[in-house]
Image (spheres, rainbow, N blue to C red):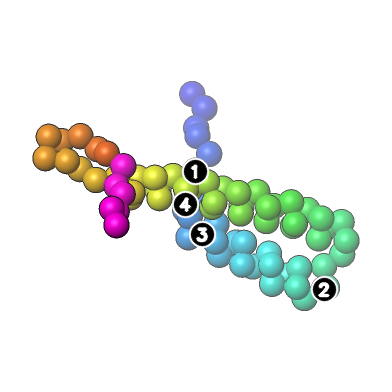
């Protein structure tokens, strides 16, 4: 039976992304490594963005008295 790859937490992905950005900003990363790091950073950024969208969709729902979830909107 094949084990699933452990999922890195959102917080850990943000930390990795910050580390990569610092490395790239230093200007001391060889070009080939910089390209790999940039690619990894873009992947992490997309994963984080997708997670935030997913969570936002869940948070923007309201549980009605009948137990159904409905989109939450503020009426002005």
33 sits to left or right of 47:
right
Residue 14 at x, y = what percent? 55, 61
Identify the residue at horizontal 35%, vertical 45% (top origin).
58
Observer-side mark, 1 or 3, equals: 3
- Of the two numbered discs 3 and 2 on the same chain, state the one appearing first in sequence: 3
Task: Compare residues 4 and 55 and report the one nearer the observer.
Answer: 55
Q: Are marks 1 and 4 in contact (CB under 8 Å)?
A: no
Classify the position of the C terminus by image quarter.
bottom left
Cα–Cα gap, marks 3 and 2: 24 Å
Which numbered disc flags the more N-terminal residue, 3 or 4? 3
| Residue for badge 3 | 12
* Circle number at residue 52: 4
Secondary structure, mark 4, is helix
Judge left or right: residue 27 versus residue 54.
right
Please name the residue that numbered disc 1 is placed on: 6
- Main SS of residues in magenta: loop
Structural crowding at the residue carrying mark 3, measured as other residues with C-alpha within 10 Å and reported as few (<14), some (14–19) or many (≥20) = few
Residue at 53% from the left image edge and 39% from the top image edge: 5
- Residue at image mark 2: 27
The residue lying furthest to the left in this view is 65
Q: How far apart in space, not on screen, are marks 1 and 3 (Cα)?
A: 12 Å
Residue numbers of the magenta segment: 71-76
The alpha-carbon separation of the residues under discs 2 and 1 comes to 32 Å
Locate residue 35, reporting x and y percent. Answer: 81, 55
- Nearest the viewer among 74 and 58 is 74
The span from disc 2 to disc 4 (Cα, nearest Å) is 30 Å
Tell whether 35 sits left or right of 63: right
SS under mark 1: loop
Residue 53, image x, y percentages: 47, 48
In this rendering, the answer to whether 16 lies above or below 26 is above
Name the N-terminal-most of marks 1 and 4.
1
């Amino acid at each position: 039976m094949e084990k699933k790859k452990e999922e890195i937490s959102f917080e850990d992905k943000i930390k990795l992304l910050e580390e990569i950005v610092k490395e790239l900003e230093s200007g001391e990363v060889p070009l080939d490594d910089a390209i790999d790091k940039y690619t990894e950073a873009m992947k992490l950024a997309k994963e984080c963005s997708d997670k935030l969208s997913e969570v936002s969709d869940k948070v923007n729902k309201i549980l009605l008295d009948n137990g159904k979830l409905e989109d939450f909107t503020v009426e002005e």
